[in-house]
Amino acid sequence: MGTSPCLYIQNRRIKRAQTLLLTTNMTITQVAERVGIYSPAQFTRLFAKIAGCKPKDYRNKLLDCCY
């Protein structure tokens, strides 16, 4: 796979979080918990590192352009 197991799992969690942010009305804290990250601050940092923006900005940016 070319990546460590830890990085692979982190990437999968964030990909799932991206889907949940766009397809549900769950809060960001609920999304974080659903993907297995129980610290909202840790989730936000990891999401920003992998996705390039904060979860709130990701949801707003993509929803604004679609509606």
Image (tube, rainbow, N blue to C red):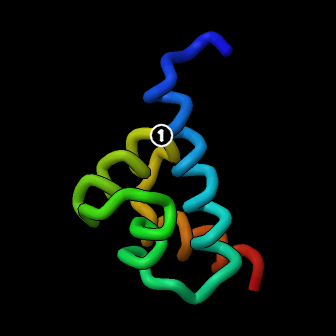
Instruction: Examine the rendered structure and indicate whether residue 40 appears above or below residue 48.
Output: below
Instruction: Examine the rendered structure and indicate whether residue 1 appears above or below residue 14.
Output: above
Quadrant of the snapshot with the N terminus = top right
Quadrant of the snapshot with the C terminus = bottom right
Which picture quadrant has residue 61?
bottom right
Which picture quadrant has residue 55?
bottom left
Q: Which SS class for mark 1?
A: helix
Name the residue rendered at 49%, 17% in the picture.
4
Which of these two is toward me, 26 or 50?
Answer: 26
Q: Amino acid at mark 1?
A: Gln
Residue lying farthest to the right in this orientation: 66
Q: Position of residue 5 (x, y in %)?
A: 50, 24
Name the residue rendered at 58%, 72% in the picture.
21
Q: Position of residue 50 (x, y in %)?
A: 48, 40
Name the residue rendered at 44%, 83% in the picture.
27
Disc tally is 1
Residue lying farthest to the top in this orientation: 2
| Residue wearing tag 1 | 10
Q: Position of residue 49 (x, y in %)?
A: 39, 40
Left or right: 61 as drawn, with respect to 31: right
Assess disc 1: are there few (<14), some (14-19) or many (≥20) residues with their C-alpha within 10 Å of its C-alpha.
some
Instruction: Examine the rendered structure and indicate whether residue 50 appears above or below residue 64.
Output: above
Instruction: Examine the rendered structure and indicate whether residue 55 appears above or below residue 64.
Output: above
Which picture quadrant has residue 29?
bottom left
Name the residue rendered at 55%, 30% in the picture.
8
Q: Position of residue 32 (x, y in %)?
A: 41, 66
